[in-house]
Image (cartoon, rainbow, N blue to C red):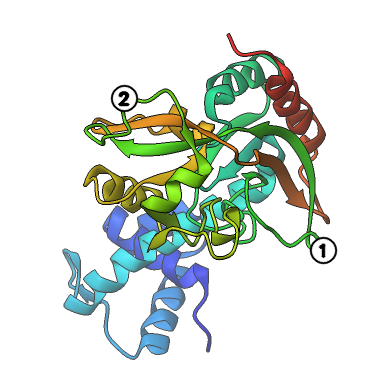
Amino acid sequence: MDLELRHLRCLVAIVDTGSFTDAAIELGVSQAAVSRGLAGLESVLGTRLLHRTSRSIAPTASGTLVLARARRLLAEVEDLVREAATGHTRLRVGHAWSAMGRHTAAFQRRWAQAHPEIELQLVRTNTSTGGLAEGACDLAIVRGAFDARRFASSVVGLERRTVALAADDPWAGRRSIGLPETCERTVVIDRRTGTTTPDLWPAGARPSLEYTSDVDDWLAAITTGRSIGITPESTATQYRREGIVFRPLRGAPPVAVHVVWPRRDAHPATAEAVALVAELYASPPR
């Protein structure tokens, strides 16, 4: 016999209602079906789950453990069914670092006004596709490389690069910094989701590099003053942090901002989302 959800439902209902009779009423089945469900579960697990007397029912030690897991599993199944049934009433937009930068709040507000029937969720996932490859979102804002065979995309804007510095760094008082100057420093790079790679500099004229794998670790390294970071301007908007300042970087190419989505079974609202992001990036700064 295999473990089935009905077995777990019987256990939870018996404990919650306090009797087999009331559990049967709650589940809409016969009392005999409840008894068989519990017996089946105990048979599959090979252990007794309930202490039963003529007056009370209480979980055994094993029953207490199984009951807690059963509640979580049943809740996850309910969430799965709900998501499958209502998936198109929600749009999950993934990102690894800074969403849409200065346009993020405007996107959220305008989406809510134009599409009140589709709940918008921003999801930050520390992967190169912002959670798209992992199924954590329906489309993603991506500033790095991705598998174009698997994902469709649209370039919605370009972002200038900036230099992230400790607030007491000697360069913090400057208006801007040239790319060749950064070769004098140690540059911290997020090798997992960052947009800066050694190819930003000519071969033979590259700075010392330090690596992290998360934006928070990247910021923490810069705060120490031992290194600097190079990042799109959106990072300065999304990650304003005490002890860090951002200055424009001269002489470096801008970073392309892509909206990326699955080539198959794309969310029905993908086109509307891409159009809105592109419109926001095309609007002049206020």
Q: Amino acid at mark 2?
A: Gly
Mark 1 and mark 2: span between their CA atoms? 45 Å
Q: Residue at x 49, y 80 (%)?
A: 3
Badge 2 element = loop
Q: Residue at x 19, y 67 (%)?
A: 58
- What residue occupies the far top of the structure in this picture? 286
Depth check: 106 or 14 in front? 106
The quarter of the picture where residue 171 lies is top left
Count of all numbered marks drawn on residues in the image: 2
Residue 195 visible to an observer of this rendering: yes
Mark nearer the N terminus (1 vs 2): 1
Residue marked by disc 2: 173
Depth check: 174 or 232 in front? 174
Q: Which mark is residue 47?
A: none
Q: Residue at x 58, y 57 (%)?
A: 128
Badge 1 element = loop
Question: Dot 1: within a 10 Å radius of its alpha carbon, few (fewer than 14), some, or many (20 or more) residues?
Answer: few
Residue marked by disc 1: 149
Q: Position of residue 182 (x, y in %)?
A: 44, 47
Q: Amino acid at mark 1?
A: Arg
Mark 1 or 2, which is nearer the eye?
Answer: 2
41 vs 125, left or right, is: left
181 vs 166, left or right, is: right
220 vs 251, left or right, is: left
Q: Position of residue 266 (x, y in %)?
A: 79, 48
Depth check: 3 or 237 in front? 237
Q: Position of residue 270 (x, y in %)?
A: 77, 37
Q: Quadrant of the C terminus?
A: top right
Q: Position of residue 236 (x, y in %)?
A: 44, 31
